[in-house]
């Protein structure tokens, strides 16, 4: 690992606008693809009379990793600039992109929004911008991609920038803080080098922009919270829950508790990247074994924490949410599925407590009868099954959620307070 400060970066945007291609380009330009791999491909390409196609190799490689799906060491792509060590916290093109955003964007420090120059703002552009705003990303880098397809036309670039600015204003992103760059992920324009194709653009390249981002917030001193993704039985070891440490540290010898399953035991071994380690920290994907806990005692959606400071289990919680796309109106009694960390639980919106003015955040109406698209509101929520969740002010990593119904994300929000069971 690098000694440079670490930044988590989310890459968001509408399908096919070039997120994967951009990630490939970033890895390629920063030398994060091993030289021997590139060399091998270069030789293959030359043999076939297709010199200069090394970049395509990176893309094939990424596509292959994606197909392998989520494994214990999730293939988080990494690269570094002069200042920072970056991890892409999202997996572009993953089949459940929105769900990834909920865990990914909530802890990304910054995001790159990819908007194809020929296509402009599309439904998922809106959805991802909205989610990243609700989940706490403060600054966006807007990459207007595929400039090659619009002949590097400055007017078209300005048009797309205006369109995106309109969207940012709607969700109250600080438009002045956002950077807008004309790029081509495929051709490489303005990613690592200033492009001759855009003489009208005198701003930074994407790598320069990433390099000059503000330092990330220091990690919180929150207690261990490790949402469980899966539970395996491994011969010779026993039950092995796996997941990513969101906050705190996990050490062998610790006594940990799983909530809401409400079982506890001592950590015997921790494994990361197929090696035993004594300790795991935020961001680490681990499998671990806990004395006396069987496969059926715990499940996906449980959160592991210290036995003397266990994860909260909500009887009800109060939350602030924003309605993004609902075909009609939301009233008290509505019971969609809430996605929080690795849990998916049907929850009833028991009461609508306040409607907020989206522009100022001030209370616009007490106890509204309904809320609809574009509304921000404070609501009281009752999970229909036990759910471990935390106030975002205490543990932001465990305090955000998305509300899904009919196959789409209809709202997203943050937990304000939890009334424990
Ligand atoms: P994603 O769904 O957002 O990850 O999009 P992909 O990265 O898979 O790209 C979708 C398609 O657009 C692919 O065929 C890419 O080759 C193409 N593409 C991506 N970036 C560019 C670009 O800068 N210029 C052009 N012409 N095509 C691009």
Image (tube, grey):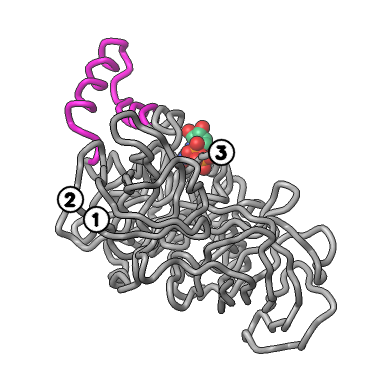
Which x, y percent locates residue 155?
55, 57
Q: Secondary structure at mark 2?
A: loop
Quarter of the image with the C terminus is: bottom right
Range of residues picked out in magenta: 32-61
> Disc 3 versus disc 1: distance between alpha carbons?
27 Å
Q: Residues within 10 Å of mark 3 (few under 14, many from 20)?
A: few
Q: Is residue 121 above or below residue 231?
A: below
Q: Circle 2 is placed at which residue position?
A: 1
Q: Circle 3 is placed at which residue position?
A: 95
Q: Residue at x 50, y 42 (%)?
A: 296
Q: Mark 1 or mark 3, which is nearer the start of the sequence?
A: 1
Q: Residue at x 35, y 58 (%)?
A: 8
Q: Mark 3 or mark 2, which is nearer the start of the sequence?
A: 2
Pointer 3 residue Cβ closer than 8 Å to ligand 1: no
Q: Residues within 10 Å of mark 1 (few under 14, many from 20)?
A: some
Q: Circle 1 is placed at which residue position?
A: 85
Q: Closer to the camera, 181 or 373? A: 373
Q: Do the CB atoms of the residues marked 3 and 1 lie less than 8 Å apart?
A: no
Q: Is residue 58 magenta?
A: yes
User: Seen from this angle, which residue lies furthest top?
Assistant: 47
Pointer 1 residue Cβ closer than 8 Å to ligand 1: no
- Using the rendered image of the protein, determine whether residue 345 is visible from the camera's viewpoint: yes
Q: Mark 2 or mark 1, which is nearer the start of the sequence?
A: 2
Q: Is residue 278 left or right of residue 226?
A: left
- Using the rendered image of the protein, determine whether residue 200 is visible from the camera's viewpoint: no
Q: Closer to the camera, 118 or 54? A: 54
Q: Do the CB atoms of the residues marked 1 and 2 lie less than 8 Å apart?
A: yes
């Amino acid at each position: 690992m690098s000694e440079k400060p670490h930044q988590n970066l989310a890459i968001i945007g509408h399908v096919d606008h070039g997120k994967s291609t951009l990630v490939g380009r970033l890895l390629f330009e920063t030398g994060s693809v091993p030289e021997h791999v590139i060399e091998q491909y270069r030789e293959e390409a030359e043999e076939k009379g297709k010199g200069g196609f090394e970049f395509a190799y990176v893309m094939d490689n990424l596509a292959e990793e994606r197909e392998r799906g989520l494994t214990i060491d999730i293939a988080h792509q990494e690269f570094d600039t002069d200042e920072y060590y970056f991890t892409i916290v999202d997996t572009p093109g993953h089949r459940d992109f929105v769900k990834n955003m909920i865990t990914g964007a909530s802890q990304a420090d910054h995001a790159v929004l990819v908007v194809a120059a020929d296509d402009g703002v599309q439904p998922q552009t809106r959805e991802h911008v909205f989610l990243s705003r609700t989940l706490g990303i403060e600054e966006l880098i807007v990459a207007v991609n595929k400039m090659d397809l619009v002949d590097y036309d400055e007017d078209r670039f300005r048009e797309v920038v205006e369109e995106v600015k309109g969207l940012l204003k709607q969700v109250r992103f600080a438009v002045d803080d956002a950077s807008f760059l004309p790029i081509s992920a495929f051709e490489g324009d303005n990613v690592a080098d200033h492009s001759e194709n855009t003489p009208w653009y005198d701003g930074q390249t994407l790598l320069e922009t990433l390099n000059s981002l503000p330092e990330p917030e220091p990690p919180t001193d929150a207690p261990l919270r490790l949402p469980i993704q899966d539970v395996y039985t491994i011969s010779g070891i026993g039950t092995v829950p796996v997941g990513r440490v969101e906050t705190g540290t996990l050490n062998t010898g610790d006594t940990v508790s799983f909530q809401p399953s409400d079982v506890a035991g001592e950590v015997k071994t921790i494994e990361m990247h197929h090696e035993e380690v004594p300790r795991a920290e935020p961001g680490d994907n681990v499998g671990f074994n806990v004395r006396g806990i069987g496969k059926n005692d715990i499940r996906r959606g449980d959160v592991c924490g210290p036995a003397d400071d266990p994860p909260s289990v909500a009887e009800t919680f109060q939350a602030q949410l924003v309605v993004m796309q609902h075909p009609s109106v939301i009233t008290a009694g509505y019971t969609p599925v809430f996605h929080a960390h690795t849990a998916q639980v049907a929850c009833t919106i028991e009461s609508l407590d306040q409607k907020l003015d989206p522009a100022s955040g001030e209370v616009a109406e007490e106890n509204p009868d309904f809320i609809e698209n574009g509304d921000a509101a404070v609501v009281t929520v009752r999970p229909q099954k036990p759910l471990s969740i935390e106030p975002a002010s205490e543990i932001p990593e465990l305090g955000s959620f998305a509300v899904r119904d009919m196959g789409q994300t209809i709202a997203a929000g943050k937990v304000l307070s939890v009334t424990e069971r």
